[in-house]
Image (spheres, grey):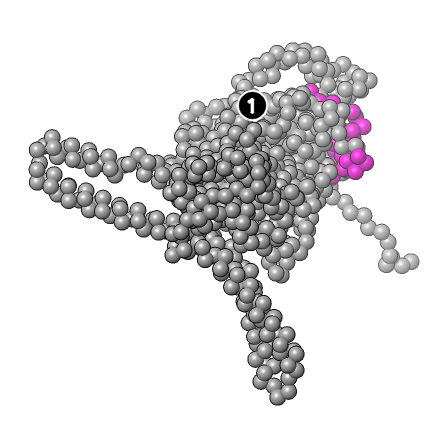
Amino acid sequence: MSNNKGILKPRAYARLLTMIGDQLIKNEKVALMELIKNSYDADANWVQIRFKNFTIDKDENTLIKNENSCIEIEDDGSGMTFDTIKNVWLNPATPNKFIQKQGGGNLTKKKRIIQGEKGIGRFAVYKLGTTIEVVTKSVIKSEKEILLINDLSEFDDELLNDDKKQETPKYLDQIEYLYEKRDKPIDFVSKSILIKGKLDMREPNGTIIRVTNIRGEWDFEKIESILSDIAKLNNPVTTKKSDSFVCEILVNGESQFIDDKDYTEDLKILQSKAPIKITDGKYDGKNTIKYKLNGSEIELSLERLLAITEFRNRFAASDRKCMKRLPECGAFTFQFHVYDRTGKAPLKYKLLPDEKKIIRDNRIYLYRDGIRVLPYGDVIDDWLEIDMNRGTGRAGDYLSNDQTVGFINISAKNNPDLKDKTNREGLLEIGNAYQDFKATIQGILGILLNEYKKYRFSVDAKNKIALVKESVTQNQFESFKQYLDERKDSKGAKVLDVIYKNYINEKKYLKDRAEISEDLAAVGIAVEAASHDLMMMMQRANTTLSSVIELTESKNYDPKVLNTNLKKLHGQITYIESQIEGIQPIFRSSKRQSKDLKITSVLTDVKRYYDGVIEENNINFVVEEVGGKNLIVNCTEAVLLQTFINLLDNSVYWLKTVDKTNKEIAIKLDKQKSQVIFADNGPGIKLDDQPYIFEPFFSTKGMQGRGLGLYIATQLLGRYDFEISYISDKKKQILVGANFLIDFSKQN
């Protein structure tokens, strides 16, 4: 009889238990967190972890284990029936939670979203020790209290065979668990229990896991780290406390705890010290990101993130300007707080040493359905590659880990492809979902870096302005002169007098140079605005001229075709001439003659420089006249051109930073009051910045800003006793963004 064909069935060796528990789970902290999550899934109100019968070495701050040492994990959850123990708890990779989730039943009776699904988390107990005793009582009153004992201490750790007898390694189904069904409960009876210092009534249901023959070494630093992770199990800032879940650790009967309320309160208080606050952030899983930046609503398309290297490298098409595909991750929410750890931080943002430590100990956390995904957010973890990128590139191109605290929330429903690794060390990195998710967050952080740079630039500018306003150098001269007078040092006084005169002459020279710079600055802005259209038309004119040359060099050509091309070339040159002519009044040599100027005509000229960018960004440009037609102002044309060019340039810049369908620039001319309101519906100007916007070199655009536009407008208008001011009163604003009032009334 032939035996060439048949059926083979896999049979797992018993060492699978230690591979899952002791080898797959990284450390005792992860093991305990897995058991705590099981208590959470079981609808427990509390879970208490007790280290019993350890000797404490106070000098070394360690727990010394002995043969009587024990770790207990007790909860008041729903407990297990005998059928659950037999068919679920004892069997690795049971799919019951996974099947429940797939069927849409992903909520517990307390409306908690079930965390586990792989069916191996409970075997984390073998990371803690080799002898396991489980006592459980189901909430089903008819069920009995069950004791389950499994002792692997007599076996070789690696092969799970009897080391003394050198027997063949055992199979998983040869491992024995002793059980006892208790008609009269011993552990689960109604009684009082102390949880975090509060007396509570212990319901007659739940689970107790007792672990003896302890494996690892324990110290208070490790316990403190676990307590910290427990405090961060739920999102400490955004999670509503409607569902109470309390965790506590006791060592030899003494409670070790971090006050969750204080911890949460510390983070909330510190949020007010963050100059960059991102709240209510949401990526819709398609192409839109929304958030509030310091309270102002921002909406971005994903294309905006292409400016960030990590996002661009993953999603940019070959032209590097548009996206080749969308991220394969789903929707998620986020909030970030970016802190200024420098010594030059303004007082309201300055951090105390203990506050710096709190920020340093909190990084960017990831939560799934409100429960933390380890190890993301640990101090030693760099899952977003922030430290790595700062080390391999320019540090200034990235926010640092120790200045950024963030909370990112995903859901199993919206992100089914973002799954936990079996060893609980983060998310699986297969396919595109995880890397796409990470690159999208890196892109958002890159946008935040730009905001932080703008903040730092404005802080530095304010500090410089303060020095000038306080006349520091002048005060120092006067103090030194007083000192020399008191010392009756006539020789030194004469030297100081010479130095002071030289200083005054140099200051006057620089002031004259600055005035020339003021006159010329708007030329650059106007030319920059018109340069795109000028270059495009010059290229077309050059192409037309080449056609004319080629045509005339041929033996036979049609005069009509030549005439058509020449007319075309004439039109193109005429356009270039008109553009240059429009800029001409801004040049310094053309500024000396005052005349009556119609504001609407000036605005028409100014808008012409920006027609291309206005159309490209779908900006609605509206001019409204009230109190009569044709507001006329007597001054040089250059003053009005420069003023409105600067205002329009700023509005266009800030409107390009927001993604909204109704972008608008509105200009209201009031003939009776001789006033103009110039407004846009961009992000506006923060209250803290408003006192500085008319100062030289102050800019909130970061390195892209000159910090001269509004200052120059103030200086030029001031020469005619005209005034420009910022409208901070929302009742007087005509649009929700930046609103400026230009007052020409003194001309009358």
Dividing the picture into quadrants, the one containing residue 290 is top right
Q: Is residue 562 above or below residue 367?
A: below
Q: Amino acid at mark 1?
A: Asp
* Residue located 76% across and 24% down the image: 109
User: Residue lying farthest bottom?
Assistant: 555
Q: Is residue 109 above or below residue 162?
A: above
Relative depth, front residue between 687 and 417:
687
Q: Could you tell me residue 719's position as x and y percent?
A: 38, 43
Is 101 left, or right, of 273 in this rendering?
right
Locate the C terminus by quadrant: top left
Q: Quadrant of residue 281?
A: top right
Magenta stretch containing residue 484, yes or no? no
Residue at coordinates 82% horizontally, 50% vertically from top-left? Answer: 8
Camera-side residue of 530 and 360 = 530
Q: Residue furthest right?
A: 1
Query: In the image, is residue 101 part of the stretch drawn in magenta?
Result: yes
Percent coordinates x, y for residue 410 in the rendering: 66, 38
Q: Residue at x 26, y 45 (%)?
A: 507
Q: Position of residue 562 (x, y in %)?
A: 62, 78
Residue 404 at least partly seen: no
Q: Could you say where residue 16 lies in the image, as x and y percent from the top left?
A: 69, 41
First to last magenta residue range: 75-104
Residue under label 1, please give it: 260
Q: In what element is the residue under mark 1?
A: helix
Q: How many marks?
A: 1
Taking the spot 61% from the left edge, 88% from the top edge, the residue there is 555
